Image (cartoon, helix red, strand yellow):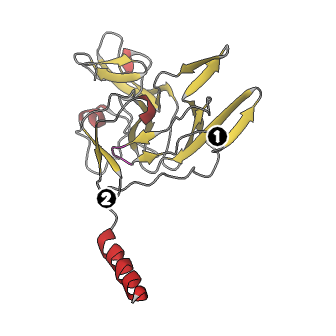
Amino acid sequence: MRARLILAFALCLAACKGPVPEDFRPVQESAKGNPRVSVSLNRITAGLYRAIAPACIGQQYTLRTATGEPMDIQPAGGLSILPGQVVEFRNYQPEVPTNVTSLSAPAALFSPNLVKPYNVRTEGKETYSYWRYAFPTPGAYEYFDTNMGEPGRKVVDSYYGTVTYVGESNAPKAVVCVDPPNCVASAECLAGTQPEGTVCCTCLGVCCEKDIHCATGRTCLRGRCVSSETGQ
């Protein structure tokens, strides 16, 4: 009799569990391979913890003259990132939880918290925990550290305990922009009027050092092109 009760209980648990929700996102393992670039999420300077301002990593392009006139678009510095290339994110305070999270297209990023003993390395006098990600497809990847703010209104699944977010984030966002290989940088691509079949560079007007790297009506703010009116 007892065995039957145990069997019935097990069958009930199996039936109640059901499929994993479509929006369930497990933490991603660190990618293999050498990184194209490393990103410092924070740093210890003179013994003091310092968060690094969100950066924009990607190819920059000159889109207009200093007076705002259109011109032939040219590459203008920055660092070109192509699909499949690896970026390494470093937490130089590995006792303090820090992560890399992106909830939006073109692909989601979900690092574990970069704390000891996860992927710990020492270079010189600095010790850090790191996570590597191979960016799969072209696009602008916005990411943030969920320990520095909520990525919107938190919604917790009552059964699985998984967390999703609705609305806007109040966490500082950074960007890694990935261009397609052998892409075209042209005024037509910037305006969305390129001929059919043209493979346009996706990082036009994304990362910047000056306003000339941004499209008309946009300005360079902390390395990223934003609206001159809203700052977004």
Residue in the image at 56% along x and 31% along y? 96
What SS does tag 1 mark? Answer: loop
Left or right: 126, with 192 as reference point = right
Amino acid beneath label 2: Tyr
Residue in the image at 35% along x and 42% along y? 200
Pick whichever, 2 or 48, lies toward us.
Answer: 2
| Main SS of residues in magenta | loop
Task: Examine the image and state in which quarter residue 67 appears.
Answer: top left
Residue in the image at 61% along x and 33% along y? 95
Q: Measuring from the top left, give residue 27's x and y in whole percent.
A: 48, 51
* Residue denoted by label 2: 159
Q: Measuring from the top left, give residue 217's x and y in whole percent.
A: 24, 19
Give the magenta range: 103-107
Pick whichever, 226 or 52, lies toward us.
Answer: 52
Residue in the image at 38% along x and 88% along y? 4
Q: Which mark is residue 15?
A: none
Mark 1 neighbour density, 10 Å: few (under 14) some (14–19) many (20 or more): some
Q: Do tag 2 and tag 1 residues touch (Cβ < 8 Å)?
A: no
Residue 186 vertical placement versus 217 (above, below): below
Amino acid beneath label 1: Lys
Residue 165 vertical placement versus 61 (above, below): below
Mark with earlier residue (2, 1): 1
Task: Examine the image and state in which quarter residue 207 appears.
Answer: top left
Residue 198 vertical placement versus 126 (above, below): below
Q: Does residue 144 show up?
A: no
* Residue denoted by label 1: 116
Mark 2 neighbour density, 10 Å: few (under 14) some (14–19) many (20 or more): few
Residue 230 vertical placement versus 14 (above, below): above
What SS does tag 2 mark? Answer: loop
Tag nearer the camera, 2 or 1: 2
